[in-house]
Amino acid sequence: MSIEKYQEILHGPLAEYVGISSEIGDVVAIQSQVVHKAFQAQLKYISAIYQTKQPKQADIADLLHPVSQHIKTVQEFCNKNRSSPHFNHLSAIGEGVSALAWITVRPSPSHYIKEIRDAGEYYTNRILREWRNVDINHIDWVNAWSRTLNELQEYVKNNHATGLVLKPKLLFDEINQGEHICRNLRKVDENARPKPSPSLAQDIKTATPTSAPFGERKKAITETAARFIRESNKWNIEHQNGNHGLTVCDAGMDNSIYLYKCADSTLTVKGKVNSIILDSCTKTSVLFDSVISALEFINCRAVRMQVISKVSTIMIMNTDGCQIYLSRDSLDVQIISSKSSEMNVLVPRGAGDYIEHPIPEQYKSTFVHGRGIVTVDMDNN
């Protein structure tokens, strides 16, 4: 029954997502084919666990490898196509496909899937705003992918509430050992491994998301080379760790700067740029002159920014710990936040001193006749 229920996901919302992706075409269609392969690989893994009386360690590693390989391919493809007009689509899938790592999570894999799904809503909400009155296909695409993750969560909750158990129970400790599972994956014969399409990703290393305790979200610990590169009018700064000398000097007003998975680092931007985005960064700071469009924090932890001249909009999404140092020219800034905590705005008062103002995190909504729902923040009550 567990296998049949999983097949219903493949033939239902997942098939709908793949079909609509084909209609949208371009990189969205290409990525969807790999996602489909990832789900098929997971079905094969689950089927083998149920049907094999005494699975061998090498067999487990061989079955796990395609799932982790396809996850890695989807995410690499997203990173290599940041200039695509469908980058939000790619990012939503790149975030959501990590839900397939539930097979290595104990004791609450369904909660892990929910955390992954919630994190990806930032991108799906962007798609809904961008395409709502333009092309209904993109709205249907979001709904199909959301149903896929929702049904996957329900499937895991109803069939594997405490984790996927081997039959017989003799190898789960090795699968659930976290990042060390990669040792097993590397032992698989290279000739036996399925090869990803060369048009999607090259030289992909083996990586399996680690197990995570309840309430935590963990991803694979992989060694990824740091990047600091300009591609046309976009600066991509990735995987910088402990680097406090990052500097962008010759950017123009049409340039955007994208920081991804940087930790314990500092970026200085000289001049006026169009936008700056910090995505999945930790303990990272950015000091800049002016931003025309917006500065965004997405999925960050313990980040900081300081503007010297002007910024009109700051967006904070799914971020915990954000310090915002404003200049006198930026006191009219708009700050938009959601699913975030520990946010503070520091306003200059002279002689290098600042006054700290916390951004509210709790709200109260009431129904008022004639006005509808009225919401006020609780921090000022």
Image (cartoon, grey):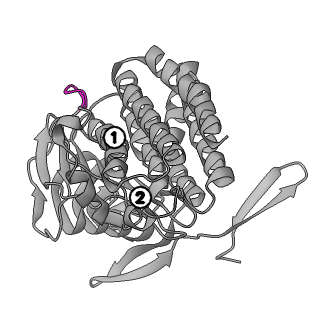
Q: Compared with residue 304, is residue 237 higher up or lower down, i.e. above or below?
A: above
Q: Is residue 70 visible?
A: yes
For the C terminus, the image quarter is: bottom right
Residue at (57, 54) in percent of width and height: 114
Q: Quadrant of residue 366?
A: bottom right
Residue 188 position, x and y percent, is 22, 47
For label 2, the residue is 299
Residue at (37, 43) in percent of width and height: 67
Q: Is residue 261 visible?
A: no
Q: Nearer the viewer, residue 137 or 38?
A: 38
Span highlighted in magenta in the image: 196-200
The extreme right residue here reads 369
Does the stretch in magenta take in 139? Answer: no
Residue 265 position, x and y percent, is 20, 68
For the N terminus, the image quarter is: top right
Mark 1 element type: helix
Disc 1 marks a residue whose amino acid type is Pro
